Image: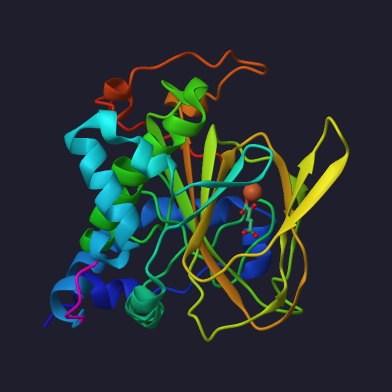
Amino acid sequence: MSATQLQRARALTLPSREAMLYREPSVQQFWNNNKALFSDAWKEWQQTEQKNEFSLDSSLLDKRLRDAVTQAWQDPSKEVAVKDLLQEVAPDVFQLQFFDPERLADLRNYLESVWDAQIPLRPPYGIVLNRRGAMLDSRSEGYLAAPSFQDFYHEMLNTYMRPIARLLFPEIMGYDTQTFGFSIHYQPNTDSSIRPHTDASAVTLNINLNLPEETFTGSAVDFFDVATGQKIALTFKPGTAMIHRGNVVHAAQPITSGERTNFVLWLYGDRGQIPPQGAKRPIIDASERWTTPTAALDSFAPF
Ligand SMILES: O=C(O)CCC(=O)C(=O)O
Ligand SMILES: [Fe+2]
């Protein structure tokens, strides 16, 4: 009997960490040549091996957020109820309860099963090469192409992130047609920190996936106010998210014990465009905010 796509994908050897770090041409070739194979393998995995009974959908989210967002989609004039769930924790950095901490175990079990699938996944190598992270968007090579995960990923971005981002940062309107995402996992000694940087996004939603009992020390995210020289260190609680413009300088402090896992979701415009420096904040009608762009997804990927 001939091998299935899932068996073929599993039989491949991933490029070495060194080759990935040095961005050797063979690495790009590996992902490009096998793009269709991996996509088929994830489909096959989902159909044949994914026994999770739970549904990967908005029931994983905080109920208050889900209810307020559902209401706002039905009647955008009710979006204030969404705004009430956002706390400004540093200048132009907002925090919200995104996932229901009680449901995070289901999501994390799913992500464990993704690792156990043994289908090659490309780790994020933007600022650092994270060993236990994955690319989430179809524009990225070696992304997590399981169809039910992709539906959920798009729901997080289209139903939740984009209108909330527009509510806070109206100048991103039009610079929010394209999606990007990855997961990161911090642990002491290996992948412990990220130096100060800005993101190549118009807006970033950084969602913590730690279970209530998964405590950690260190690993605060610093937000820098360039104008005042102030630095504010914020610590994630299970299932909470921070949302900020991509151009805010931030860094992850070294994690000193435990582990921290998150999803990082980005929106930007076609071909990676972001709002110009000092862009005016237009006044936008609520009904414009609660819409999904019809532009086709392009293939631009910042890393
Ligand atoms: O540590 C974090 O949560 C921030 C990660 C981050 O800034 C990034 O991946 O660009
Ligand atoms: Fe970042």
- Please say whether residue 145 is one of the residues in the magenta stretch: no
The segment highlighted magenta reads: 52-56
Image point 22% across, 59% down: which residue? 147
Q: In which quarter of the image is the N terminus?
A: bottom left
Left or right: 3 with respect to 79? left
Picture quarter with the C terminus:
top right
**Position of 219 relative to 206 (above/below):** below
Q: In this rendering, does residue 200 appear at all?
A: yes
Question: In terms of image quadrants, where is residue 76?
Answer: top left
Q: In this view, does 29 lie above or below 273?
A: below
Residue 262: percent from the left, percent from the top?
52, 64
Q: Is residue 73 left or right of residue 169?
A: left
User: Which residue is found at the position 32% from the left and 57% from the top?
Assistant: 64
Across and down, in percent, residue 112 comes to 40, 80
Q: Which of 258 and 122 is in front in this view?
A: 258
In the rendered view, would you say 218 is above or below 265?
below
Quick one: which residue is furthest to the bottom in this view?
Answer: 213
Can you see residue 292? no
